[in-house]
Image (cartoon, helix red, strand yellow):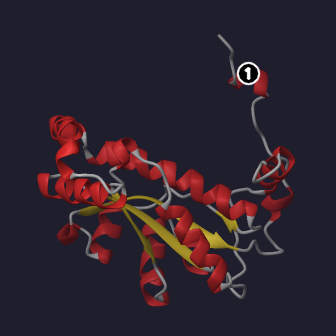
Amino acid sequence: MSRATPASILDALNWRYAVKQFDPTRKIDPSVWADLEKSLALTPSSFGLQPWQFLIVDNPDIRAQLVPHSWHQRQVADASHLVIMTVRTSIDAAYINRYLDDVATTRHTNRDTLAGFEKMLTGSASMMTPEWAARQAYIALGQFMLAAALLDIDTCPMEGFSAPDYDRILGLPDQGLTTAVLCPAGYRAPTDSYAAAPKVRWPVTDVVKHL
């Protein structure tokens, strides 16, 4: 049995838009937010390596500091929640070993059976750049926005920010992390005129081709 109907998914996708004005008085219910955090953790990634850390900025003072480095976009401060998707600046042997240990434990298998997989990961580590990691973060971004839309929660994917300033304010360099993309989440303000604007998309026949 389908967990969702095609109509419900398309309805959510047509309903969502990149919110320009959030209602600062409306907050996401904690239990609903907890499920959205789980949706982030369930995101697939290349090799399953999950090269990210999702920072939820609850502190209003920190969010206020970030606004000038976000092209003064108020979504960063006004949304109920702010998700900062950060990624690892490198994937080293220690990280790979930790991941493989987790695979063995979770799947109840002997670590030695993963030797071939380990060889493949270590051989590919040089290609696991911050740019590669950022592409994984965008998978999380898409999954998060769809999950939110299905729960009638608004989002706004944002690339308009200064990553070096974000990294500095959040102390990310010392953690081996860098900012990839932002996603404020909450509820649209009644005054946001973009909510009523028709969605502009190329026709399916233009963007989907069968070979």
Of residues 132 and 188, the one drawn nearer to the viewer in this rendering:
132
Quarter of the rendering containing residue 163? bottom left
Q: Amino acid at mark 1?
A: Asp
> Does 116 sit above or below residue 165?
above
| Residue 121 locus on image (x, y percent) | 22, 40
The residue at which mark 1 appears reads as 206
Residue 187 makes an appearance in the image? yes
Q: Residue at x 58, y 51 (%)?
A: 142
**Where is residue 25 drawn, in percent x and y?**
71, 88
Please report the residue visible at 62 percent of the width from the left and 61 percent of the height from the top. Answer: 156
Residue at horizontal 82%, vertical 63%? Answer: 193
Residue 90 in view, yes or no:
no
Query: Which one is in front, 109 or 6?
Result: 109
Above or below, 147 relative to 76 = above
* Residue drawn at 21 percent across, 60 percent down: 98
Asked whether, in this view, residue 50 is left or right of residue 41, the answer is left
In the picture, measured across the screen, residue 96 lies left or right of residue 208, that is left
